Amino acid sequence: GMTWKEYINKGALPINHAKMVDDLIYIHGHEVLVDGYFNGDPHPGNILLLHNERGAPQLGLIDYGQVKQLSKNDRLLMCKIIIAL
């Protein structure tokens, strides 16, 4: 895979930015609300732009060394906050 900076040097990103953001929101939302875990250190350096077996762009998430677990009550409170927004 290539890091974000390696793609920037190529002048153009071969991905749909809106889809990438949607995918990241879905992935992190699923981690928190469904699985009950969250990455305490999400930053662009932990997001890789990869290519799947067909050559299509794909996200790769790394460095889950700061993972914490949320209780069911915490997850329900998070849902209430999201709905309130």
Image: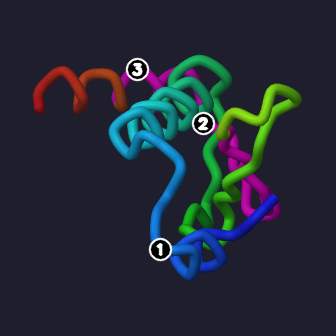
Point out the image quarter for the C terminus. Answer: top left
The one of 69 and 22 positioned closer to us in this rendering: 22
- Count neighbours of disc 1 (C-alpha within 10 A) and say few if under 14, some if 14 to 19, many if 20 or more: few
- Can you say which quadrant of the picture contains the N terminus? bottom right
State which mark lies toward you, 2 or 1: 1
Name the mark on residue 11: 1
Q: Which residue is mark 2?
A: 70
Where is mark 3, residue-wise?
A: 76
The alpha-carbon separation of the residues under discs 3 and 1 comes to 43 Å
Q: Amino acid at mark 2?
A: Leu
Mark 3 / mark 1, whichever is N-terminal: 1
Magenta range: 58-77
What crowding class fits label 2: few (fewer than 14 Cα within 10 Å), some (14-19), or many (20 or more)?
Answer: some
Residue reaching furthest left? 85
Q: Residues within 10 Å of mark 3 (few under 14, many from 20)?
A: few
Q: Nearer the viewer, residue 35 or 54?
A: 54
The dot on residue 35 is none
Residue 66 drawn in magenta: yes
- Mark 3: which amino acid? Leu
